[in-house]
Amino acid sequence: MIQSNDTETLKSRFETHEQYVVSAEPQIVAARFSPCGTQLVAGGFDAQVRRWSLEADKATELPVMEGHDGWVHALGFNTAGTRLFTGDSWGQLRGWAYDQPHPTPTWIQAAAHDGWLRELHVSPDGHTLATCGRDQVVRIWSADDGSLQQELVGHGQDVFCVRYHPDGRTLVTGDDRGVVKQWDVATGECLGEFDASVLYLLHRLQDVGGARVLAFDKTGQTLACGGTTPKNGGTVQGTPTILLFDVATRAVTHTLKLGAPNHCLVHDIHLHDEGFVMAVTSGTPGQGQLLFQRPEDDAPFYVNTKMPNCHSLSVHPDGTRLAVVATNRGSNGNGRRLDKEGRYAGNTSPIHLLAWGAQADA
């Protein structure tokens, strides 16, 4: 990553200010800006794909995209923004014609994975996409027609995350035990492993942690792997942790510990071109953090703890805005009183639109 100037200057340049909040009910799992930056797309617990048209001071919700069977947990666009790909907790994968006023599926893989499809990532050239899931398998699909191109077997554990290298020739996948594998896309050969096992603990017969999120920097020289340094199982406690690897040697170059044990998990990561890590965390009870930190520093130069349980981070294409998916305050689960109509109030997901620099002043 390119190294930027001192932390005080970075803090003044990148301190975020909230523009507005998009309200989503029921809960949203992840949200992503469209490549053109004019729309926000999100998937959630209601098996729908939600969309909003974005303006300077508000967001207008567009018709939902329906057809999934479970939680829509995985989202990805091709670079042109003409196709959207979505995956759910029942293993279904869909390709959508997103350049249409009312997007419709161009293809459907009803059982892309046996069980939860954890994540998907679209190749840099937009021709293929990779998925991973609870069935311990990684699969590569044609973005054009959804046909299976390659099957990568070897993890032996639930595979949480997948990322193409910026050159498109290799991809990396991370599993429940903190094993991160690097694969040759053309041959399906495993080229080696990154050791992220510090992110895993077996405690009280419970698997805790694992490699939960992966991200490359723009050059492809640095790989970030996020999760937690687990303290215990049960009501999981652990320190949010990001490991930075040198891709050429697969060696850890930096370990970032982001908060206290009750902050738990790193859920999303973006490696900024100016040499710092952007991340969101979610912990118990209701702990949430948005953090920016340079690898060589002992602490973040920016921390926002005003958003509970942050699960998703998306950087706008213009590089001056963020969308952070959080949950409503008091989202700890059961114990709430019924409303006057006798209904139980479920959790919601405020999506915070944040900006810095000229956009924050607009």
Image (cartoon, rainbow, N blue to C red):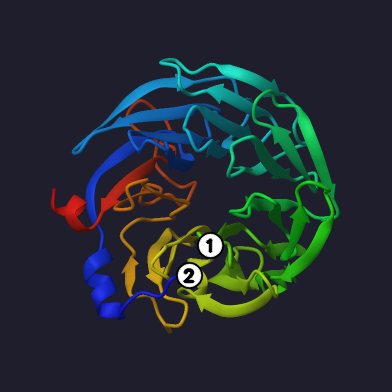
Residue 21, how many percent across, how many down?
27, 42
Q: What residue is shown at x 77% (from left), y 53% (from top)?
A: 184
Q: Is residue 204 left or right of residue 82?
A: right
Which amino acid, mark 2?
Met
Which amino acid, mark 1?
Thr
Q: Is residue 180 left or right of residue 342?
A: right
Residue 204 seen by the camera: no
Q: Nearer the viewer, residue 302 or 244?
A: 244
Q: Nearer the viewer, residue 228 or 337?
A: 228
Decide: is 217 above or below 259.
Answer: above
Q: Nearer the viewer, residue 112 or 350?
A: 112
- Tell me the SS state at disc 1: loop
Q: What residue is shown at x 42% (from left), y 58% (from top)?
A: 286
Q: Is residue 329 left or right of residue 200?
A: left
- Tell me the SS state at disc 2: loop
Decide: is 243 above or below 335.
Answer: below
Q: Specify which label sits upstream in the sequence, 2 or 1.
A: 2
Residue marked by disc 2: 1
Residue 161 seen by the camera: yes
Label at residue 164: none
- Residues tagged 2 and 1 counted as in contact (Cβ below 8 A): yes
Residue marked by disc 1: 219
Q: Quadrant of residue 86?
A: top right
Residue 84, how many percent across, how many down?
53, 30
C-alpha distance separating marks 2 and 1: 7 Å
